[in-house]
Amino acid sequence: MTYKKVLVTGGAGFIGGNFVQYMVDKYPNYDIYNLDLLTYAGDLSKHREIETKHNYYFAKGDIADREGINHLFEKKKFDFVVHFAAESHVDRSITDPSIFVQTNVMGTQVLLDAARQFGIEKFVHVSTDEVYGELDFDPTTFFTEDTPLQPNSPYSASKASSDLLVRSYHETYNLPVNITRCSNNYGPYHFPEKLIPLTISRVLNNQKVPVYGDGKNIRDWLHVWDHCIAIDLVMHEGLNGEVYNVGGHNERTNLEVVKTIINTLGKSEELIEFVTDRLGHDKRYAIDPTKLEQLGWKPTYNFDTGIAQTIEWYIDNREWWGGIINKQH
């Protein structure tokens, strides 16, 4: 059995947290190290079921702390780095862009330097379709890996910057890397400020659900577990230096998503409250995942099955998200 050490940055967050659980369970012969600073969106309670497993380890740390990162890499000698750690909420980036540059750009550079210095098999950088900018409402147009980067928010600009850094370390230093760019994720342990968990929690509490503008902005939705499978595949099989788009062809307007949740829970659409649109709000995202499918990946969830499962999870786990919401007030 092959033995590997995998560093997962941001493993207390939403996507990174699901990936940590997936890897710990799937690869008992791999040691999985979760590095997270535990900022507002970081939560270790989601890992209670795996924290006693022999192959799971947690380290609290800042990816922008060069001394701490170098010490960790030197001590543990990782084989793989899967880099999720990022500030990711667009609204917060509009209010304060500086922390996004510090974490998403400078932090990524620190990790790349450590990966180069101490030698790894693969550095997987988890990015977003938002780096491509926006599409119009023509349903035949999609983002591909060759779409030019045209980020429209400070968040997506910081992610595009980190993508280019990762690419440059491959081209200049021959560092073995892959970049994945995913569409909007949803599923268990999604932080309650994001659209789907915010809507579910508010509807369950009979509170108004805010919808930006006219609600016609379109997103392509990807179940987080399908995303984890994709990253696992890219980590092991991705061609060095390549970018892989991860999307599920599950396009919905924001208003459709909100109405689906309200109707599933048997509540009134009068809970919908239209609010002033977000600054620079992209019209539409949609991904063509053909390249990843050729590598051997297929999503297992369509939106209807995935959202039903997610709603059920939030009903069954009120204690988790309720505690987070209470902490914010």
Image: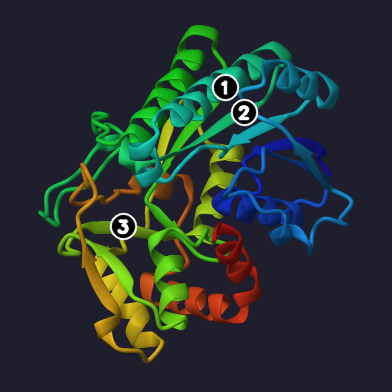
At x 26%, y 65%, the residue is: 211
Circles 2 and 1: CB atoms closer than 8 Å: yes
Q: Alpha carbon of mark 2 to alpha carbon of mark 1: how far?
A: 5 Å
Q: Is residue 249 left or right of residue 215?
A: right
Sequence order check: which comes first, mark 2 or mark 1? 2
> Is residue 65 left or right of 194 when viewed as pictured?
right
Residue 220's mark?
3
- Which amino acid, mark 2? Lys
Q: Earlier in the sequence, mark 3 or mark 2?
A: 2
- Residue beneath disc 2: 122
- In the figure, 211 relative to 12: above or below? below
At mark 3, the secondary structure is strand
Residue at the disc numbered 1: 176
Residue 251: quarter of image:
bottom left
Q: Is residue 148 above or below residue 57?
A: above
Residue 329 location (% of width, % of height): 54, 61
Which residue is drawn at the image coordinates 28% and 57% (left, top)? 219
What's the distance in space between the residues labelled 3 and 1, CA to CA?
Answer: 29 Å
Q: Is residue 253 visible?
A: no
Relative horizontal placement of residue 50, taking residue 271 as reference (left or right): right
Q: What colour scheme was applied to this rendering of the protein?
A: rainbow
Q: Residue at x 61, y 23 (%)?
A: 64
Q: Are marks 3 and 2 in contact (CB under 8 Å)?
A: no
Q: Pinpoint residue 214: horizontal percent, then vertical percent.
A: 15, 64
250 relative to 241, above or below = below
**At which x and y percent is residue 271?**
30, 80
User: CA–CA distance between discs 3 and 2?
Assistant: 28 Å
Amino acid at circle 3:
Asp
Which mark is in front, 3 or 1? Answer: 3
Q: Amino acid at mark 1?
A: Pro
